[in-house]
Amino acid sequence: MSNWKLLSGVAAASIMTAAIVAPAEAQVTTSSVRGQVVDANGAAVSGATVTITDTRTGSVDTATTNASGVYAARSLRVGGPYMISVTTADGSAVRENVFLQVNEAFRGDLQVVAERTMDTVTVVGTTGDGTLALGPRSSFGLETIESLPTISRDIRDIARLDPLVTVDETNGGAISIAGTNNRYNSLTIDGIKFNDLFGLNANGFPSQRSPISVDALETLSVEVAPYDVEFSGFTGGTVNVLTKSGQNDFFGSAYYFYSDDDFSGEQVNGREVDQSFQETTWGVTLGGPIIKDKLFFFASYEDFEAEQLLDAEDLPGASGVSQATYDTVRQITVDEYGFDPLAFGGIDPVTDKKFLANLDWIINNDHSAKLTYIQNEGNEIQPRNNGADLGSPSTWYDRSEETTAYAVQVFSDYKRK
């Protein structure tokens, strides 16, 4: 009979969040464009209508230049490509392949040129954001995320691209930003805070592993101690993650990863060990239109399963208890009480399941809405033996966590009202 302890749901039973997210309560989840329209002589063009088109969804936002030729468009979806265009009596100008970063204002200056001279000005890439820096920050878009190799498939592998971010692998993968304690940081996904409310996980997440699949990421930004009033609830740094949304074209992915003990060695410090294990990861993503130019969806699912490497044969070594003493105590408990402190079995494999769904609705040119649903369920076996505490397998436990979060966000632009 196995006498090991099960502790199920000790870290987090469930986090339920239902809110209309406002910038004061969560991280910024949109971007913006601003710039100046001038003529061929560099003079400001006032009263011109600038059109910002998201080529993925066909959504259009317009802005009118003021007396200084300056325009601004807010609450724009992150990513791209966007097309920015203007047409006046003096001519027209276009900027294409514009990609927007979260919480950054793209500088979209336009110079109107007579059509007989030049119809279009095409710019590939992005320019400086033209915003006031409220602390050091980095932003990583879809191209960077997709090209980054990651064995653990964890959002921390992306965050550590920031030179001020370190991941302490000896402390459960804790994230330190600019040297601060990981407990002072904050993680948000689509405006939803995903912090370890109970303080049991060194990684700072409410889950054992990354709460969402990296295949679901659109962009990730790192802010170091920002003093903007839009941020609150932390004193260190913040990792702000935005997930993918649907568009007019269907897109998706499918993947499978496998590893076992055939890929690892058989000796540790000259001693042969049995490290039999097997782990698999598979997942799918799919996004596209429900109603073209109006309603879109995106969904992601990832499943991880593994036999955790646990060594119950060399427990006394680090604690200073001799093997002979340990064997004697073990034999007494077996003979007198019928209890084997090394008994450990009947445990399901370690698992981690991630699900995310987004529903985007373009109401009109001034208003849009987004529904996000995230669910994560996973577990990890926690050994209890270390240099100061000798814990046999009967004291180990299974720590399982389940996180559920959802949010409704409404984005409105009242600049013309």
Image: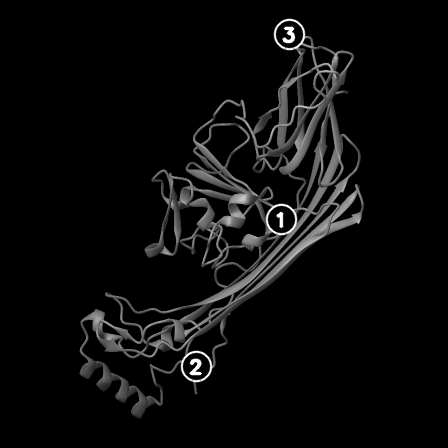
- In-front residue for pair 29/126: 126
Which residue has dot 3 on it?
Answer: 41
Which percent across, then down, holds residue 198? 47, 53
Which residue has dot 2 on it?
Answer: 345
Which percent across, then down, holds residue 385? 30, 69
Please name which of the two marks, 3 or 1, marks the residue nearer to the observer.
Answer: 3
Q: CA distance from mark 2 to mark 1?
A: 37 Å
| Mark 2 or mark 1: whose residue is earlier in sequence | 1
In the figure, residue 35 lies in which quadrant? Answer: top right
The residue that appears at 80% across and 45% down in the rendered structure is 292
| Mark 3 or mark 1: whose residue is earlier in sequence | 1
Q: Is residue 27 left or right of residue 4?
A: right
Which residue has dot 1 on it?
Answer: 17
| Colouring rule applied to residues | one colour
* Residue 306 shows in this picture: no
Q: Identify residue type, mark 1.
A: Thr
Q: Is residue 216 left or right of residue 3?
A: right
The residue that appears at 34% across and 40% down in the rendered structure is 179
Q: Identify residue type, mark 3.
A: Asn
Residue 180 lies, with reference to residue 119, above or below; the image says below
State if disc 1 and disc 2 touch (CB < 8 Å): no
